[in-house]
Amino acid sequence: MAAVSSNPITQVSQTLPQPNLQPQLLTRLQLDLRGARFNVDRETIMNLPESVLLCLFPNGLVLSRQSVALSDGGDEEDDEVYGVDFDPECFGFVLSFFRTAADTFYGTSTNPGLLALQQHLIDTIPSPPSSDFQSPSQNPLLTKQAIIVLREELEYFAIPHHGAANDAMLNLKRACGQNLLEKRTIFTALQRNVNKENNVAEQHLIDMLCQSGFDRDDVWGYRALEPSRCCISSIALVLLKTGITHNPSAANRDDKVAVDYVQMSTAQKLLLFWRKPARKCWWDGVDVDLAHEGGSEHIVKLWARRVWTLELSLV
């Protein structure tokens, strides 16, 4: 064993103190979506649907400042702008829906929310035997606002019956895109596939969604053509039908809220899609007439590859 020096100089540790290299968490993010600026706080970002976050940040979401290893603590967040290739109108639609849903459920400074009306359910009433939760406080459908998120990515391919030159083909693709864009009903294409293939699972999916908040004739909340692509992006957002109904004007506290536990049990099945988006893909081919008004018939075979993403968000 080496002898320990008695020299006090050699006993002093030569290890220099390390600076704090922990990156600072951003409280807000400056996003540039195709030229449109959004200033969004961190909590709002984290509450967004997983499928939307994947589109916004395909390489992963970083909520810490990248160049702050030796930051002096100054406010530099306004200087950092994240460029994102995502439809700004679609993003605004999602933010607005989520903000309205949260204000309605949790309340604002001037209006109490639905959570206040059903607080006694969480505090006093035991869970029914059919519930998956030991106590009501563990049931997120009582303590959170649940939103069903359904997205569709549609890529289309036009096959003319006769050959077309480049300019004519470009005009044809634009006309096909406009034709599909105007078909806003959510379930028409999937129901057509059910009728064609007699697919029981797809019919069950439609039935489940319509029992949980959608109507069979609902239209997409936002639908738009992607720039420079033969692609249409659509999204629909609905509040999950949990079986809880509110009557704020009732005099008795217990009469202000009623719970349909059969519907609650149906709604709990959608919890399987919380932070776990499910995807479905299928091909859809139809003949469309792209003739101008008063013109001769112009039939085109229009193929569409549709990808649905279904998930549940809790805010």
Image (tube, rainbow, N blue to C red):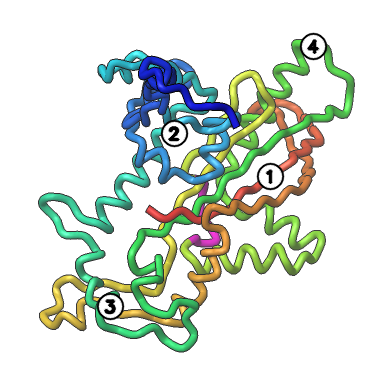
Where does the image place residue 260, in percent across and percent down from the top left? Answer: 39, 81
Amino acid of disc 4: Asn
Q: Determine the CA span between mark 1 and mark 3.
A: 39 Å
Q: Is residue 216 within the magenta segment? A: yes
Decide: marks 3, 2 in contact (CB < 8 A)? no
Which span is picked out in magenta?
Answer: 214-220
Task: Please tell me which of labels 2 and 4 falls first in the chain.
Answer: 2
Task: Please tell me which of labels 1 and 4 falls first in the chain.
Answer: 4
- The single residue placed furthest to the bottom in the displayed view is 129
Residue density around tag 2, few if under 14, some if 14–19, many if 20 or more, within 10 Å:
some
Where does the image place residue 65, in percent across and percent down from the top left? Answer: 41, 23
Q: Nearer the viewer, mark 3 or mark 2?
A: 3
Q: Nearer the viewer, mark 3 or mark 4?
A: 3
Q: Nearer the viewer, mark 1 or mark 4?
A: 1
Q: Nearer the viewer, residue 98 or 233?
A: 98
Where does the image place residue 134, in percent across and percent down from the top left? Answer: 43, 80
Question: Residue at position x 58%, y 68% from top?
Answer: 208
Q: Secondary structure at mark 1?
A: strand
Q: Secondary structure at mark 4?
A: helix
Residue 91: mark in rendering = 2
Q: Nearer the viewer, mark 2 or mark 4?
A: 2
Task: Please tell me which of labels 1 and 3 falls first in the chain.
Answer: 3
Place residue 73 in its image quadrant. Answer: top left
Task: Please tell me which of labels 3 and 2 falls first in the chain.
Answer: 2
Amino acid of disc 1: Val
Decide: marks 2, 4 in contact (CB < 8 A)? no
Q: Can you identify the residue that label 3 sits on?
A: 121
Task: Please tell me which of labels 3 and 4 falls first in the chain.
Answer: 3
Q: Can you identify the residue that label 4 sits on?
A: 166
Amino acid of disc 2: Phe
Place residue 191 in its image quadrant. Answer: bottom right
Q: Can you identify the residue that label 1 sits on?
A: 307
